[in-house]
Image: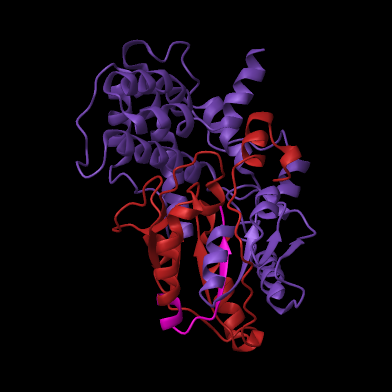
Amino acid sequence: MVRLADLDEPERSHLGTIPCPDFETRPWVNGPAMAARRVAMVSTAALQHRDDRPLLAGAGDYRVIANDAPDGDLVMAHISTNFDRSGFEQDLNVVLPRDRLREMAAAGEIGSVGKYHYAFMGSTNPGGMETAAREMAGHLKADGVDTVFLLPV
Amino acid sequence: MGGLAHFLEDEGLATTQISLIRPQTENTKPPRALWVPFELGRPMGAPNDAAFQLRVLRAALALLERTDGPVVLEDFPDDAPTDTAAQENDEGWFCPISLPPLAMDLAAGGGFKTAMAAEIAGLSTWYDIALRERGRTTVGLSGLAVDEIVDFVCAFLDGRVPENPNGELSLGQNLKFAVEDLKAYYREAAGAQPGHNTGKQMNNWFYGQTAAGTALYALWPIAAELARQRDDGFMKTFANLLLIPASQKFRAEKEEA
């Protein structure tokens, strides 16, 4: 469905030509065996708890999503109107698959799920997220997380 | 997204990710990415399809076992089942809730408010059913009840500038959240009955067949003019980019042509 060729022209050109960062290095971390990994998720869907300060356009900061927070406590503050929200409205897992990750942990396919997941505002210059992302990495490692699954929206 | 993966990997965390826009991932070159042919907004493909979501998740995590880095970009082979079912029935999805017919001139004499109130009266039972069955609602960004949202939006349509309901945010940001809540209320109600639908079909219904959707088209020039008068950058962005999806503007232009 999101093959660029399937989109109408204004959107196709816009999405296909968004400037992207060009990094000089290509870091690569292997990590432990799959069954020993502790996995957390990072979403750019601007998810947040209802009583969080709203994630606003252009902000490079993040919100912390507790792995055990009720689904009903999470809302989406993303600025863009050019993506579907009805899937998220029907099932949080289509954006942040906490249930699926827990099932994999329960089945022993992965080691465990991090205590917290994190959400940024998409449609934001990645350079503006760097400080927050590196700070977040410290929190993830403090929780014993060694593997991060990232999801755009 | 790829930038975040780069920063985290640089900090010693292994990462894998979903890619929705393949050219962006090709340019950013994150360590591991699984491109998926799914609708924007549905990175795991299909709501309420645990088996399919699990397939996507396993495929993304499997990239962590690859040894041919430092850049791995793999394609997920299948379309989302929701998309397939909806496309087979492309013209067939319609809102199962019968709404009052749209008046010819909604802008006259508080017509938008009357029409939206009537629609919400028709939708409210289904919104409540959706809330009960899903155990959650995503309405709530603005902090306003749905009838308060209608009053807030209609004040702009009536040529007034309403009081900012939350002084911690700009008027434009509050209007953005109110509009998102309004759309979510309609979609959650309309999606209460079982059946496959895509975001495009839901948007075609909302923007093409409801008074609320028509109201947002009417709000567009009003918000743009307010932005000009107040030199309000966010309100300008809201009016021109964040109010009506680009695909819906394109659809409306096609229908008028």
Q: How many marks?
A: 0
Toward which corner of the image does residue B254 lie, by quadrant? Answer: top right
User: Is the residue B186 above or below the residue B232 in the image?
Assistant: below
- Residue B138 percent location from the top left of the image: 42, 51
Q: How is the image coloured?
A: by chain
Vertical comparison of A37 with B159: above or below: below
Q: Indicate the quadrant containing the N terminus of chain B: top left, top right, bottom left or bottom right.
A: bottom right
Is residue A65 part of the magenta span, yes or no?
no
Pick the front one: A72 or A74? A74
Q: Please state which of residues A76 and A73 is positioned toward the viewer in this rendering.
A: A76
Q: Which chain is purple?
A: B
* Residue B207 vs residue B9, the one in the foreground: B9
| Residue at 60%, 49% in the rendered image | A20
Q: Which residues are magenta?
A: A139-153
Q: Residue A62: percent from the left, percent from the top?
A: 39, 60
Q: Residue drawn 61% across and 50% down?
A: B194
Q: Can residue A25 be spotted in the picture? A: yes
Q: Is residue B75 above or below residue A145?
A: above
Quick check: can you spot residue A120?
A: no
Residue at position x 71%, y 72% in the image: B63
Rendered red, the chain in question is: A
Assess whether residue A147 is covered by the magenta stretch: yes
Depth check: give the residue in front, B219 or B169.
B169
Where, quadrant-wise, is the C terminus of chain B in this rendering?
top right
Up-down relation of residue B184 to residue B223 (above or below): below
Side (left or right) of B173 relative to A101: left
* B232 sits to left or right of A140: left
Residue B169 position within the rendered picture, expressed as x and y whole percent measured from the top left:
26, 42
On the image, the x and y values in percent for residue B39 come to 65, 47
